[in-house]
Structure formats: C-alpha cells, structure tokens
Image (tube, rainbow, N blue to C red):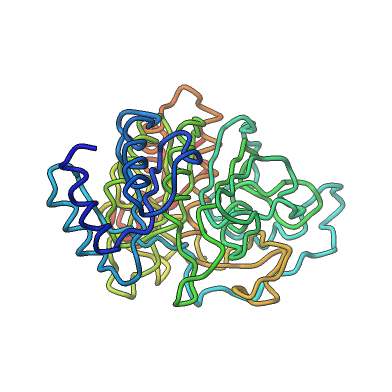
Amino acid sequence: MPEAVDEPFRALRQDRAIQEVIPLFALAVRELPKGAGAAAVAARLTASVQYSESDDLKGINLLEISKSADAAAVAKQLEKSPGVEYAELVPARWAAGARGARKRPARRSRERAGTAAKTDPMINRQWGLRAIQWFGRRWPDSSDIRVGVLDTGVDGNHPDLAFRFPYVSTGGKREDIVGHGTHVTGIIAAATNNTTGIAGICRCALQVWKIFGDEPAEDGEYYVDEVMYQRALNDARTKDMQVVNLSIGGTAYSRTEELLIRRLIENDCLVVAAMGNEYEQDNPLEYPAAFAGVVAVGAITETNRRARFSNTGPHISLVAPGTNILSTLPLKASAYRNEEETEYGAWSGTSMAAPHVTGAATLLRAKARSLKAKEVAERLSKTAAKLPGMKGRRTTALGSGLLDLSALI
C-alpha cells in the first residue's frame, strides 16, 4: 500500500484499535484474510480499490474498532492522512415508528363483509386508504414495477403477504423480530380481495432487504446494521428498483449514505423516506429524508392535522396518514413487541406515512411509464391536497399537503 494509506493504519494496529476492515463493495471478500494483522488490513484496503464493483465506490471501507478505542479520535486520526479522503462515524439509524404510539393490535377477523366473495374483512378500519382517496377507483396494474423495502425484514409466511418475492437477509436471520418491516410492507402490498385481513395500496414486484441486526443495542432498541444497509442501498441500484421505501431515520449525516442514495436517484429510482418522529425532542433534521432528491414524508392524524411526533422542516415533500395505521405483523410473537402483537396491529409513525406514498408512486409509475423519478416526485407534491391551516400554501409542517391518489392518477 502507499505509505500515506499504510501509516495511519499501522499506528492504529500498534494501538490495537483495529478489529476488522470491511471492504463494503469489493468483490470476492470471502477470499480475503480476516483480522487486524498487517497482511489482512493491507489486503482488504487494497481490495476495496482494486476489486470495487464501480469507480465511485472504490476505497469505501467500514472499520470495526475495539471497545477501548475512542471512535471520534480514530476518525480524526485517519482524516489527517493525505491517503484518506474522509472518515466518519457510523450514523445511528432507527425505525421511524413512534415510540409509545402503538395501540393494542387488531386480531384478524373471521367475518366476511357483505356478500362479496373476496372482501378483505378489515378494510373498513383502514382510515388511511380513505384519507388518500384509494377507494372507489380501479387502479393500474403495477405488478411489474420494482419496489424495494429496506427495513427490519418481513414475515413472508403472513397470509396477507403470502406471495413470492425476493428477500435479502445478508448476515442475519430471515425472521422479522421487530415487526416494523412487516408492517411497512403490508401498507404497500398486502394482498387485496383475498378474504384475509387488510388491503395494500398496490400490487408490485416487491423486494425486501433486511438491514437490521438480530440483537438489540444496550438500550434495548434495534438499530440499522451499517454493512447490511449500505450494501442493500447499492444492491437496490444494481437491481434497478423503481421505488425504494426507507422508513428509517437518524440525526447524524453520512457522506457514504448520501453517495449511495444519490446513485439510486441517478438510476431513476424514487426514494421515499420518513421525516422522523422526534418533533417533541427538539425537532432535529433527520436523514435520509433530508438528502437532496429524497421524497420526505410527514404524518397526519385522522383529523387531517400534523401528528404531534412528526418532524417538520423545509425539506418535507408532503404528508400521509401516520397514526393508528392497521397493517400486517409477524405471526411469531417477539419479546421486543407486546406478546399480543402478532398477525395485525395498528401502529403510528412517519414510518407508516412513507409507505402510503411509496404505494401511490408505484401506481403512478405504472400509469405513466414515461415519467422519470424526478417527475413522479414533482407530481406527488403538485397534486397533494391542501389541508386546513395551510392557507393554500406549502408549509414546513405539511409540505405540499396530503397525498391524494384521485388527483395523482
């Protein structure tokens, strides 16, 4: 390796600060030596440049350091070297479901509504579908529109999600322990008219990436696994996803995350993200919603008012239903969730608002196939319904207004 690259890593090895170097986008990583030895570190750093799948991802590595090392000090030490372009701390990202806002789950009804042979028995409880004008229309066939969900995983055995779709669970179990990803996925794509549970907004060519680990952090919460997340963002681009849902958020900026999302957008993918649920905790700016080109979605209540938890800011695009949203949950109970929270449940958060927009964008991409992702984003905002208090104008609390399917398509 060049001395400018080797010198700072040699110093970190001497201090026993390094545990592992992970070349995130290098090919044939399994063949590389592991550990913190000089040969392993050199091989992995070199591979991140020589065997990168594309030029703009060359040299991107994740550095695992020992618990005794000061992460901020390590980053500063690396940035001083002329051989390192930038070094940043891994940003915390969490699921944007409002803590403390979940309600007792709704068990699947055994009743059948009316005389229709194929009615979803819980559909009348989906106030979000009414709010976005989903009822009363025949929507375009979007079964070939490629939609990606990057989340805590999904229970593919759920009766409302029992259709074949690719599921990537790199480095972890297939199980959705948290349940968040299953809930988000159901809002978008739960089977319609199958005499079971609820209805999703659209039928699509769905793919789900699990980007959360299987063990909680010391505070008992689950956070995004950076390796799984960054590789999923890149994989979504290589698989030409047309819409991607990111119901996650965090306050720390990441240059690498911004690069990967920009690459997705440049590949004509519409990226939809949750605004965040920390309005009452100083309303911080949260990513990935704050990245340029991302459709940032806030949450409203059944009374068409901003949900008290929903973050605000000039980057907000529009709002969608986000309180007491009924959707699918894993069939298996989890210690992380209330033991009764299985099969279906009503959850709240900007996490629940974002997939409403993802589903709507999927229908629009099916209807107007010549539209580019940027044009889809513009149309989502342009057709949004103005809400009381907006005075006909865009606001930092509600963006351009409420998602309106009847005007969008």
Vertical relation: 204 (above or below) 218: above
x 65%, y 67%: residue = 345
**x then y, percent, for residue 259:** 31, 40
Question: Is 323 displayed left or right of 262 in the figure?
Answer: right
Residue closest to the eye, 72 or 276? 72
**x then y, percent, for residue 380:** 42, 41
**x then y, percent, for residue 286:** 32, 59
Asked if one can make out residue 257 in the rendered structure from this viewpoint, the answer is no
Callout count: 0
Question: Is 295 displayed left or right of 126 in the figure?
Answer: left
Vertical relation: 160 (above or below) 236: below
When asked about the image quadrant of residue 304, the answer is bottom left
Vertical relation: 33 (above or below) 226: above
x 27%, y 57%: residue = 13
Residue found at the far top of this picture: 370
x 40%, y 38%: residue = 25
Residue closest to the eye, 386 or 323? 323
Residue closest to the eye, 295 or 248? 248
**x then y, percent, for residue 63:** 34, 54
x 51%, y 49%: residue = 150
Q: Quadrant of the N terminus?
A: top left
Asked if one can make out residue 285 in the rendered structure from this viewpoint, the answer is yes
